[in-house]
Image (cartoon, helix red, strand yellow):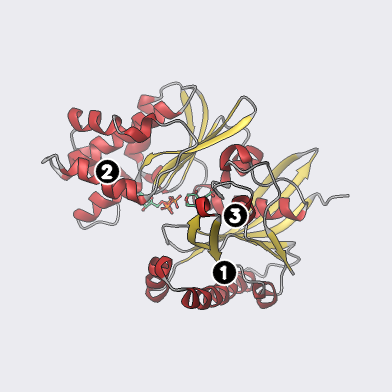
Amino acid sequence: MQKETYNVIGVMSGTSLDGIDLAHIHFSIVDTKWSFKILETETVSYNNDWLGKLKIAVDFPEAELLQLNDDYTVLLANVIKTFIEKHNLQHLDAVCSHGHTILHQPQNGFTLQIGNLPKIAKLINQTVVCDFRVQDVQLGGQGAPLVPIGDRILFSDYDYCLNLGGFSNVSFEQNGNRIAFDISPVNTVLNFYANQLGLDYDDKGQLACSGKGNTDLMNELNALDYYKKPFPKSLGFEFVKTIVLPLIERYTIPIEDKMRTFIEHIAFQTVVALPKKQGKLLATGGGTYNDFLMERMQYHLPQLEIIIPDKKTIEFKEALIFALLGVLKLRNEINVLSSVTGAKSDHSSGVILK
Ligand SMILES: Nc1ncnc2c1ncn2[C@@H]1O[C@H](COP(=O)(O)OP(=O)(O)OP(=O)(O)O)[C@@H](O)[C@H]1O
Ligand SMILES: CC(=O)N[C@H]1[C@@H]2OC[C@@H](O2)[C@@H](O)[C@@H]1O[C@H](C)C(=O)O
């Protein structure tokens, strides 16, 4: 007999290095239908020393990487312990932790998330479920994305789940399969131009809103090869650095016009990415705070109901879903979909440490 409720913590550190996201979650399952409540949440920023190390770790020799893994496991354990004590969390079923991706070369059969060493369970005195990507790569998959199964299980009321982070990605059902792919760059490009004006980001998209769209630039962006490729497909910062920014930089127009044009481009590519231009779309990630972007998206998709959830869901959806992946692993149930990762089959991934 499986349990019907779970009291867990989800822990995620994303590639953008904005910190370690922790979310205390209650799950319950009634007649195969899952529901959740996001309780306490917190993002713990990295100090400059850690930021520096995590940025360059990809080039570390093996010995240094082993040391980093050890040190990061201790850091993560301390952060988790502090979170548990601060909120006086008791009777946890597990801490479900992604760790931090340092190396990811699925084509060569390996992926490394640090912070998942067995000693973490002892250090925090809890059951830990972690290392969710490794088995998928062993089964011939990309080890990513892992979030779409959570979209399917927890957000089935929506036709689409759209995340607006450094890049945008979407997941949806098609012919009984979950489909997921990256649509276009978002904040990687918008922040680049905000930085040129001395800002971290364009608050609410106000600068972009004050600019003018440039039709030639818009057409050139929309003609890029990536947009013609079929899924599965994904983007990395290389695409921005070597293709998108050099293209935009050929135009001698005000920065606000570049931002405005790029927002139109994001909205336009979102339209292209969605097979049906109607239904309900759940939008999450920091890009949802860009009011102008959201307005332009709604303009281009008038029949679509765009839903921006509460702040915790916007900011902690990934930690929530890693918490679910851990619970599914505890239940020995499928938590990775081969339709999105390309693995030989669906599987129950992760390691349980006690
Ligand atoms: N008030 C705001 N107005 C406009 N943009 C905002 C605002 N607040 C946050 N953002 C944007 O959201 C970004 C952070 O979003 P998020 O945390 O989803 O990105 P991320 O961690 O890089 O995402 P991912 O790892 O999913 O790619 C900021 O860098 C900024 O560009
Ligand atoms: C290998 C790895 O850590 N990939 C991350 C990364 O950050 C965003 C994107 O690239 C996504 O593929 C993935 O994370 C999300 C949470 C996922 O697996 O769904």
Does residue 61 appear anywhere in the picture?
yes
Badge 3 element: loop
Please give the name of the residue rendered at 68% of the width and 42% of the height, measured from the top-left corner.
346
Please give the name of the residue rendered at 67% of the width and 72% of the height, measured from the top-left corner.
118
Label 1 amino acid?
Gly
Residue 330: quadrant of the picture:
bottom right
Please give the name of the residue rendered at 24% of the width and 55% of the height, measured from the top-left corner.
195
Q: Quickly name the residue at label 2.
A: 243
Q: Quickly name the residue at label 1.
A: 115
**Residue at mark 1 to residue at mark 2: CA–CA distance:** 34 Å
In percent of width and height, residue 109 lies at 55, 54
**Residue at mark 3 to residue at mark 1: CA–CA distance:** 13 Å
Residue 205: quadrant of the picture:
top left
Mark 1 CB in 8 Å range of ligand 2?
Answer: no
Mark 3 CB in 8 Å range of ligand 2?
Answer: yes
> Could you tell which of marks 1 and 2 lies nearer the N-terminus?
1
Label 2 amino acid?
Ile
Q: Quickly name the residue at label 3.
A: 133
Tell me: 252 left or right of 85.
left
